[in-house]
Image (cartoon, grey):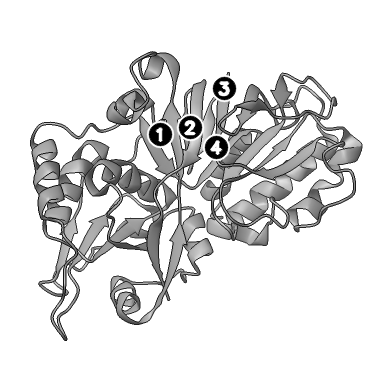
Amino acid sequence: MSAPIYEFAQLPQTSGKAAEKVRQTRSVRAPRKRAAGEAPSVGVIYNPRSHGNQGADFDCGITPQVHIAQPGDRSQLPDALADLAARGIDLLVINGGDGTVRDVLTCGANIFGDDWPAIAVLPKGKTNALTVDLGVPGDWSLQNAIDAFENGGRVHRRPIAVTALGENTGEGAGENSSEDAGSKVLGFILGAGAFTTATKSGQSAHRLGAFNSMAVGVTTAWGVIQWFFAGRTNSWRRGSRMTIALGPQEAPMEHSGTGDPAWRQLLFSSTLETMPAGIKPFGPLRNGLKLVALDQISRRSAFLIPAVLRGKVPARLRERGIHQLTTPQYRLTIEDQFILDGEAFPPGDYSITQGPELEFVSP
């Protein structure tokens, strides 16, 4: 679970032995009724490569009801999750960062379908945007998560589902061909254009010791400076060539007329409601699949960015090239890499929708 570039062609496939486990799991995974006083059955996906786990040993002997899997890479995740599902776990604990969450949800989609157990996330990555949204403290432990399963809260979220279209899945293969091919990825934060540049800059922030909300804040501040002072050819201001088609009818997203209409300076999309560092890029929009897109805005309009990030909605925002909206789905055709939960995906044609509703445990 550590490759730097996550190509759709390299997604783990649920086949062979894992596929048989999936069939068996779906036949036995009826709602489990626990006896009074019985401890919950807990499955843990532990990523030893996550930033917060490096050099740390995980206590594997907490209780017989806790089953821990340490898959060495993404290809081992389907087997690990199928094993946990076959045990009828009540709680799935993901010990890692946003990238680990993305991999577990992606590989688990073919195993759990619409019948996921409750999920808890331990914030052990360089970035932990999901746990910020869930209100999970940075020092949350496995025992804290188990206690919260019994006595804590629940937060429902639907991840972003990214499906490769066209030649990546075989045109004309049928409505569900992309899903059957295993090319759908589930995550929570998608970005392109300057966001891709920002993610690469964020790696520099990590090397300087800035993580989580601090890294987001540092990178955002640097991006705003670039928008103010950089030239049009700078990657922060140039963005990427892309088209965004909204809704089932794939209506072309409007453009302010500022800059090249074939380019967008930035695309940022998420289903989360609370962002790291307190930023509010979607303004008052909170529920569902949200996106903010910037045309190649003028330097004068760039001075609106700090207010927008604080959740303000200045007058004539769309006319100035800053678009905030919600949509049930959209199609993204892009000639540059885009980012999903911290990793780069190749240029191409993609359908962006919402995945299954998941129940997360919160303190």
Identify the secondary structure beneath mark 1: loop
Q: Quadrant of residue 231?
A: top right
- Mark 1: amino acid: Pro
Where residue 128 sits: x, y (%)? 48, 56
Q: Which residue is mark 4?
A: 329
User: Which structural element holds mark 4?
Assistant: loop
Q: CA distance from mark 4 to mark 2?
A: 21 Å
**Which sits earlier in the primary sequence, circle 3 or circle 1?**
1
List x then y, in percent, for residue 212. Answer: 53, 57
- Between 112 and 242, the one nearer to me in the picture: 112
The residue under label 4 is which amino acid type? Answer: Gln
- Going from N to C along the chain, the mark reached first, 3 or 2, is 3
Q: Is residue 60 left or right of residue 203?
A: left
Which mark, by number, is residue 290?
none
**Residue for badge 3:** 333
Q: Quadrant of the C terminus?
A: bottom left
Q: Secondary structure at mark 2?
A: strand
Between the residue at mark 4 and the residue at mark 1, the CA separation in whole angstroms equals 27 Å
> Which residue is denoted by mark 2 in the rendering?
344
x and y percentages locating residue 306 in the rendered image:
80, 52
Q: Are marks 1 and 2 in contact (CB under 8 Å)?
A: yes
Question: Mark 4 against mark 2, which lies toward the viewer?
Answer: 4
Q: Which residue is mark 1?
A: 4
Q: CA distance from mark 3 to mark 1?
A: 22 Å
Residue 351: image x %, image y %?
49, 30
